[in-house]
Image: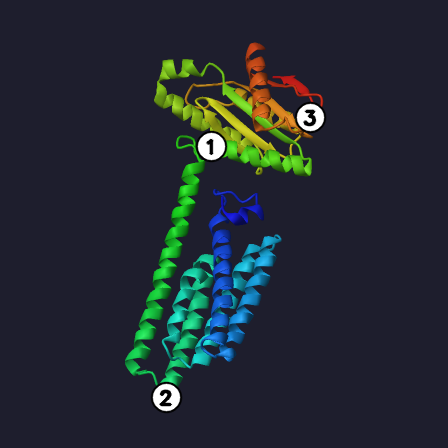
Amino acid sequence: MKYWRKYHPTIGTDDPRYHQVSLIYSVLLIMLIYFGLIGLLNITLFDAAHIAVFDFFGFLLAAAIYFYVSRGGNFKVAGWVVTATLIFVLLAFIHVAEGQNYSLLWVTILPPIAFFLLGPKAGSWVTGLVFAYCSWFLYQLLGQGVPGNLSLGAFFNFIEVATAQIFLFRYYESSRRRAYEQLQKTSATDPLTGIFNRLHLDNTLKTLIAASKRDIQATSVLLLDVDHFKRINDEYGHIVGDKVLVAIANIMKKETRDGDLVGRWGGEEFLIICPKTDAEQAEQIANRIVKKLNSETLLDDINVTASIGIATAVAYEEEHNAETLLQTADKNLYQAKADGRNTVVASFDDVAFDSAQSSI
């Protein structure tokens, strides 16, 4: 487990911010170590106190940013401040060194950090402007005859390398983000229906349970099972059965709200997670789905019904978790089947749950 997770326990490995936050903390630690160590060396070994001033300034800025993000600061703001601090220190060092001792090479560490923290578009503008300024600075040095074997060839080499880095890192970061988004989508969705899969539902429900304990918000789950689905597979075949499941998934998406999560629990079972939803609201959603299935023909001549078990938690105690909530929904689903199917059933614990029951 990464050390910074203690500051941000809600950011898991499946969170899009995970790698960005990890890089922010990594860069800050490197900056703290580098600026502190090099600042001491510049004072004690190289007798360059004027350069050490910039090193210690960078150290203080990095420490301030670290404190800011570890106390819940905005990560986007932190990314910009980290990048700006790095640019300031790099350009200050290049100016003080007057381009000698290959000081301009240090600016090449900027693109990977800027593109990752700021994104392809902003990263392109930032690195492009910094490289343009460094090119102008190098050109001015050529006119002044600064020692260090600077030549027109060195100037053009810097331009070529800078341009190549911008294009390469922009392409890399754009490709990485597209690949990551595709991977996230693939890992979270059911390949047949295109709705969320069980793994994503499990992880999301655990997160919502933790939030409901903290915020005392109601969380409801609806466990839906298609009635007599085996008959459809036996009579029409599994290909048609798959199409029926896709049609049911589409109906559930239409009959639920924007904040609800619709997923396939397994086989012909579906799970709907409804954040900030009490028992009455959950029952209304379930009834809409059942009525819609009753009134709509899914394929040419195929009609289906469904049974739904509901569980709603309002104020959690320690023993109430995602598992117990799902067990309650599953128990109510079996009760709906026993009551003749095509029914919505919900009954809850007196302490942590409200109760409701309805039939269609």
Q: Give above or below for 189 relative to 155.
A: above
Picture coordinates of residue 313 (x, y %)? 65, 28
Category of crowding for the residue at label 3, using alpha-carbon neighbours closer than 10 angstroms: few (below 14), some (14–19), many (at least 20): some
Residue 357 lies, in percent from the top left, at 66, 18
Which residue lies most toward the left here?
153
Point out the tag, 2 or 1, that comes first from the N-terminus: 2
Distance from the alpha carbon under mark 2 to that under mark 3: 78 Å
The amino acid type found where label 3 is placed reads Ala
Mark 2 neighbour class, 10 Å CA radius: few under 14, some 14 to 19, many 20 or more:
few
What percent of the width, then of the height, locates residue 188?
45, 37
Q: How much space separates mark 2 and mark 1, taking CA atoms?
A: 63 Å
Q: Is mark 3 on a helix, strand or loop?
A: loop
Q: Is mark 2 on a helix, strand or loop?
A: helix
Which of the numbered marks, if any, corresponds to residue 199?
1
Query: Can residue 289 be seen from the camera position used here?
Result: no
Q: Which of marks 2 and 3 is nearer the N terminus?
A: 2
Residue tagged 2: 143
Query: How far is disc 3 from disc 1 in space, using C-alphas?
Result: 25 Å
Residue at 54 percent across and 35 percent down: it is 204
Closer to the camera, 129 or 49?
Answer: 49
Up/down of 258 relative to 327, above or below: below
Q: Dot 3 corresponds to which residue?
A: 352
Above-or-below relation of 250 to 339: below
| Above/below status of 96 relative to 191 | below
Under circle 1, the secondary element is helix
Amino acid residing under circle 1:
Leu
